[in-house]
Image: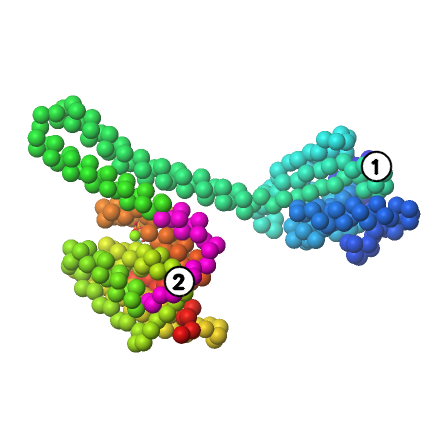
Amino acid sequence: MRLPTTLSGSASRVQTTSGSASEPPAGMGSPARASDQTWRTLVDALPDAALTLDAKGVVIHQNHLICRLFPEMGVGRPMGQLLRNPDLLTALEKALASPGAPMSLKFTERVPIARTIEARATRLDPSLQSAVLLVTFRDLTENERVERMRADFVANASHELRTPLAALQGYIETLQGPARDDAEARERFLGIMLSQARRMTRLVDDLLSLSRVEMRAHIIPQGRTDLNEIAAEVVQSLDALIAQHGVEIAVSRLAGAAPIRADREEIVQALQNLVHNAIKYGRDKGRVEIAVNRVASSGNTVSRLAVSVTDDGPGIEAHHLPRLVERFYRVSAASSRAKGGTGLGLAIVKHIMARHRGDLTIASEIGKGSTFTLSFDELPG
Ligand SMILES: Nc1ncnc2c1ncn2[C@@H]1O[C@H](COP(=O)(O)OP(=O)(O)O)[C@@H](O)[C@H]1O
Ligand SMILES: [Mg+2]
């Protein structure tokens, strides 16, 4: 009996197959049944997708996680016909040839979707009769995506910090050297240095905010608060900025109470970010409207409350909308920087809303303006 020929797909199907994965293949003597059942139970209990193969490469048993990973796989089928990866087959042969030395291998699948899978093959004790190899599979696709995102995030954050840092360093060197005795240049450079230092502070503040919200993502907020009050508080806190931009602010409250379950400070922060954006990216001396509403909900059990922020600015092209909540995504990095942005505001809003089981929706029309809406389940009075 040699594995390689059969793993490559030339095996005839064993006749011992039964439809059920939990039934042992026929032909096994009863003395073997006890231990047979034991290893089947072990395979079923493994946290990874797992199957056992006979020396011909035919599946003897598989756990339910296999069905999720490879729906086509089944007891009695030659594994090599479904997973035609030559490296995988080589790894299986090696594992078979070297008891006590499990082989592991990462391979990619293109169909039905691109996936990265890690396989481990372990030679089993020959006393287990027909099963000679235990093969486990782990889908690494999601892990790799998260890892890539984390790496991108660190690269972006470092880049964002390095830019003002490089500027600061340049001005310091100039002040120490050529501009040493130039009082006028000193004044100007110190002003720029202060604004670069502030930019770094904003970035670090936003990074910390983001990490705090993320850390609390699984803790359901316990407080009770009112959206009408939050809207009023946010307008008050942005008074100076509103005056500075000459923006007209209109607040329309919901008649009566607008109670939601929320961490008050976080909702204030989320709404502040939206109003701040409306002021910054909206029309110069334009109008910003904050409205608290009761909205129709799809499921009719609880009604929803929403607070929306509408500006009459230039609007945002549709293709940007789904990406605005990504960290560091900006329609124009230059304009965001010039306006003191970090590119993290909407990412923070998104995380706050996720923690509150609420939604953030964005609608925009070029030439007319944008509306950002936060919505929550209404708390029964
Ligand atoms: N009201 C708005 N009108 C037009 N563009 C907006 C508006 N709000 C946000 N944006 C766009 O979304 C981007 C991301 O926003 P945000 O995450 O708050 O970052 P930041 O304001 O720091 O740049 C902004 O850079 C801007 O391009
Ligand atoms: Mg912002």
Quadrant that contains the C terminus: bottom left
Question: Tag 2 or tag 1, which sits nearer the N-term?
Answer: 1
Residue 223's label in the rendered image is 2
Stretch of the chain drawn in magenta: 209-227
Say the numbered circle drawn on residue 126. 1
**SS at circle 2:** loop
Q: Quadrant of the N terminus?
A: top right
Residue 181, position as x, y percentages in the image: 9, 25
Q: Nearer the viewer, residue 92 or 291?
A: 291
Q: Is residue 170 left or right of residue 91?
A: left
Q: Residue at x 45, y 44 (%)?
A: 149
Q: Nearer the viewer, residue 292 or 107?
A: 292
Is residue 214 located in the magenta-colored stretch of the structure?
yes
**Number of on-image labels:** 2
Q: Is residue 170 magenta?
A: no
Other residues around mark 1 within 10 Å, as few (<14) / some (14–19) / many (≥20): few
Badge 2: how crowded within 10 Å, few (<14), some, or many (20+)? Answer: few
- Going by the image, does 274 lie left or right of 35? left
